[in-house]
Image (cartoon, coloured by chain):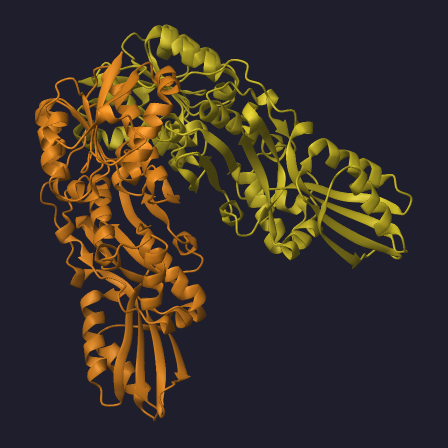
Chain colours: A yellow, B orange
Amino acid sequence: MQLNVGLLGLGTVGSQVAERLLQKRDSLARRTGVVLNLRRVLVRDAERPRSIPSELITDAPDVVLNDPEIQVLVELMGGEEPARTYIERGLRAGKHVVTANKVVMAKHGPELLELAGEMDVDIYFEAAVGGGIPLISTFKVDLIANDIERIAAVINGTTNYMLGRMGADGLDYAAALLEAQAAGFAEEDPTADVAGFDAVYKLSILASIAFGARVHPDQVFREGIEGIDPLDFRYAKELGYEIKLLAYAARPNGKIEARVHPALVPVSHPLAQVEGAFNAVYIEGDLVGPVLLRGQGAGGRPTASAVVGDLLDLVFTIRKKAANRVLMTFDPDPPMLPMADVVTKAYYRLRAEDRTGVLAQVGRVFGEEDVSIASMIQKDSIEEGTAELVFTTHPARDAALARARERIAELEPIRRVGAFFRVI
Amino acid sequence: MQLNVGLLGLGTVGSQVAERLLQKRDSLARRTGVVLNLRRVLVRDAERPRSIPSELITDAPDVVLNDPEIQVLVELMGGEEPARTYIERGLRAGKHVVTANKVVMAKHGPELLELAGEMDVDIYFEAAVGGGIPLISTFKVDLIANDIERIAAVINGTTNYMLGRMGADGLDYAAALLEAQAAGFAEEDPTADVAGFDAVYKLSILASIAFGARVHPDQVFREGIEGIDPLDFRYAKELGYEIKLLAYAARPNGKIEARVHPALVPVSHPLAQVEGAFNAVYIEGDLVGPVLLRGQGAGGRPTASAVVGDLLDLVFTIRKKAANRVLMTFDPDPPMLPMADVVTKAYYRLRAEDRTGVLAQVGRVFGEEDVSIASMIQKDSIEEGTAELVFTTHPARDAALARARERIAELEPIRRVGAFFRVI
């Protein structure tokens, strides 16, 4: 049996996928009973010299999308359009799809899965989240017997690398960003990573599958890491925490909570030990308890591992004519927990006039907002005549934490609230 | 559609599986499109009162095995026989099988998988290794595009708990064992765990799937943790290591290396941070790079998570008439690397007369055996007139490490070789 594959996009991931399909053709055929034949590769510039045989290359989308011999499209272009349209055209033409596209799957996944069901084909997207770490399959199949209680993840390598450099080596935000750009971890326009959008897309995909409910990226609370002060890494360390860009989803009392923001993570928590460009996802299921999955969350080879893994799983499925074998259903409009109602611990850093009565005033505000203090550090500040106060709190409603923050900022002896983080 | 399930064994795992099937019958049916009907439960003593409806209970194996209405057998009895025979009878009768039985799968897995193929049914065994951690599915499908280079794992919770108590709290081996037995982590006869058999079974299953080659438990090198001296935890810590019961498999130069033994693991290695009864498997694939999977490796609920997950995956498969969808092939007789040829680092602790020239003599033996020293600690010993010498080495052939150990023990000023560990 032979299966013809059309590849859309030949960037870092696409090149690795093409290489594996071409170089391991025989051994993959032995393992799956099916010859995977790379038939067409869509690129932007067909003239550029490449290692792929030139007769496979085209810059005309229709040559791939309209080829009736192609049974599987592998979409590795990235971005919302035209990728979404191409995927939809492929599905409507009865082609199976493997994609690594987190934007498309986060925004349009449930509709595309439904369309695939109608057309009796499959859409696979393991590579859309966490590179080669088996996340989608874990939620889709392995943990299906569980009610998933909680997902806590570090799923953006760029920000994790930057925060690591700031925490370990005292770089400021701008220097960490420049370094990440030089190392190829951050884009020229780093917004998608540093403002948290990338993590939001990934979390919305994971939460949708974990909870069987459509969690749209717009419904995920988002704060980025822009402008984090190196000072807070020192206080965090003193208190026993690392600072991470946390992606968190849970289902307290039947409502879905989904949020991406910098957070203090206890050093003993497995997510605190995730270094550099690595990703890790911590899952709690009612039967399985806590499970941690960790690996390289991006990059050509790890992502190609997921793409080719999907492709081979699809081969098994096609061989048995078992498309849409694993059912996925999504509550189209699940109740969401607004950020104001989220219950979380927090960290405040204040700069205050160095005089008596300040603590009493701050303490009164916390008390009136029903926020209970867990720990406090007071230090001389570099600003003459001021002191730095760092508080951590016990769990409280996010709205109360925000109000306390505003009211404290207005207290007469408070120069400013220098930082506010949530604490996991 | 309805699927009738026969359950063999109602211990901690079986009870959890039965409970989930009975209590979540409706929600599982909604998610899978299939009603899972628990039809029969085989127990040893049918008279004992239980929470399961008594009409389901039987102590006659044939009542379950010969019931033509039962399409799936869930084998949770444990042990080699009669479990293996029952599984074989089930497969021959055209029933699918889900099992948590590591002994049967390690010793007979490839034959049973082949038989299942002939009968066009499936045998699932995710629960046989690592409780609810998705390991089998990860190797079987997710990482299938990879050449697996290496597996390093902590997959026996009992020994990990004991080693943790010895390392952190200075308990000796006997006290740690008593405590593990009291906590329910160790059996009355702890041999299967402390002598490494349990880890060997699990590693042989993982290595077989990872390498597509039959690795029989008898081919796995095995050393247990019996008699480990608390002293070595202190030296290990000083050198920057934890002591773990390591399960390791690799494929250097096409030969399979598979071994279970206590080992020094650098504190920075993800396996060093696996605490208590947790399991973790560290995998390196040529595309995906390093991946770590961690969770509760045993216990009723985590194991039930894997069993019911398998059962639901099987439901999807049966619904689509796609048995034997995922191919697994095993080289029946792969070349194995003998332990003597394994290349590893090592740790030696010697007690020596406290006089000049000892170091030179020990150093000469290491040199003659082509073992290069990486670090050395010398301390006064509690024995009058003696010193304790601790060496770690660079990588060397295991045979050379063993010969060095023997020759050093025979040196005149050496009272004894107090400990020898391999180092990852």
Horizontal side, residue B158 vs residue A243: left or right: left
Between A16 and B182, the residue placed more toward the observer is B182
Figure quadrant of the N terminus of chain B: top left
Between B27 and B366, the residue placed more toward the observer is B27
* Residue A299 placement (x, y as % from top left): 44, 36
* Residue B124 placement (x, y as % from top left): 22, 31
Horizontal side, residue A56 vs residue B56: left or right: right
Identify the residue shown where x is 52% and y is 48%: A269
Horizontal side, residue A214 vs residue B334: left or right: right
Snapshot quadrant of residue B383: bottom left
Number of numbered discs on residues:
0
* Residue A217 placement (x, y as % from top left): 57, 22
Camera sees residue B142: no
Snapshot quadrant of residue B374: bottom left
Snapshot quadrant of residue A2: top left
**Is the residue B403 above or below the residue B280 in the image?**
below
Identify the residue shown where x is 37% and y is 6%: A118
Figure quadrant of the C terminus of chain B: bottom left
Between A87 and B296, the residue placed more toward the observer is B296
**Is the residue A40 above or below the residue A266 in the image?**
above
Camera sees residue B21: yes
* Residue A268 placement (x, y as % from top left): 53, 52
